[in-house]
Amino acid sequence: MTPSGLIDAVREFVESLSAEKGYSIHTCRAYRRDLEEFTAYLDGNAGGPPPGKGAKKDLGPNGVTPLMIRGYLGYLHRKNQKSSVARKLSTLRSFFKSLVKKGLIEANPAEGLLTPKREKTIPVYLTVDEIFRLLDSIESDALLAARNRAIFETLYSCGIRVSELTGLDVFDLDASAATVRVFGKGGKERVVPIGRKALDAIERYRERLRAETGIGADRNGPLFINRQRQRLTARSVGRILKKLAAACGIATPISPHGLRHTFATHMLDAGADLRSVQELLGHRNLSTTQKYTHVSIDRLMETYDKAHPRK
């Protein structure tokens, strides 16, 4: 029982995300994966039951009912966290909403379903001492070591996403203005400040790169490259960070995104206002940035407990 009409609609929807909305390849892949999981569920190939006796082989978007989606959510709850279920439901809402807008279906079958309440999780981050220990542990004598030092100085200095870092080109960096131009989700461009430590690390890396390979800063191209002189990938950055953290004895399971958490946490803890940090991170909604205020609140409570005469 393959829902062929639904599969065609999914393919067209995912293609429109890139062409019409400018979504990144990673975002489009995530949408496609979620929707393909849903069609596989309807097909009975995802470990869940088929949608019902009345379902037909050529099930199209009009044949999907709220009851089918409710059954799918129940299936998801058995093996997914609430945050994942909420994301997958959001994907279905967006998909069917686009079909309503195009006049292909009359109503959105996912519209009236309740979104699972997400668990409140504290972002993983490093303390100031830990991030300094990590960065200072990276020797910068060899080319790759100099590159690694520049990478992680930049991630912590700017708070950018790892995909934004690996997407940086040489001409995106303006050393004289101490800024870097990044392209975030949906290709949205923003300019963020970069600190002196990071700029110095990048300069040392690029000088060594020019000396050993002849690749200078006078021509554009990837700012950070691998051994094959190709653009570094986000996965490679994650592997490098994991090795460096283990080598210097950091027990916290840190990832490149964890360095973004660390940047935001330290900025807010030092007194930066929430909206400024929102702009630096490139968050569309302020609520996304608010999850980093936990440390400032904890510090505030600690200060209150120590200082207030009648606490």
Image (cartoon, rainbow, N blue to C red):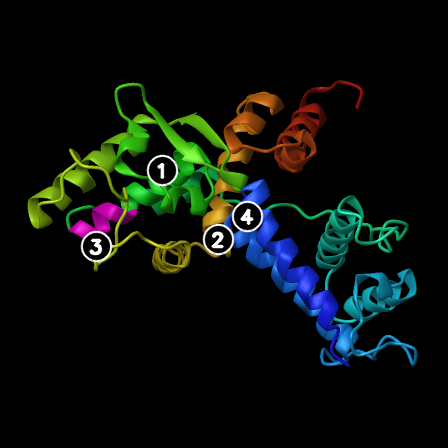
Q: Which residue is mark 3?
A: 229
Query: Image point 67% across, 61% down: which residue?
Result: 10
Give the residue type at disc 2: Ile
- The kind of secondary structure element at disc 3 is loop
| Image marks 2 and 1: residues in contact by CB distance under 8 Å | no
Classify residue 281 as left or right of residue 176.
Answer: right
Depth check: give the residue in front, 18 or 126: 18
Which of discs 2 and 1 lies nearer the camera? The answer is 1
Tell me: residue 250, above or below residue 209.
below
Magenta segment range?
A: 143-148
Q: Which residue is mark 2?
A: 254
Q: Position of residue 7 (x, y in %)?
A: 69, 67
**Which of the marked residues, 2 or 3, is nearer the chain's N terminus?**
3
On screen, residue 292 above or below 13: above
Q: CA distance from mark 3 to mark 4?
A: 28 Å
Residue marked by disc 1: 154
Instruction: In this rendered view, identify the residue nearer to me: 69 or 135.
Output: 69
Amino acid carrying label 1: it is Thr
In primary-sequence order, the first of circles 2 and 1 is: 1
Q: Amino acid at mark 4?
A: Ser
146 inside magenta stretch: yes
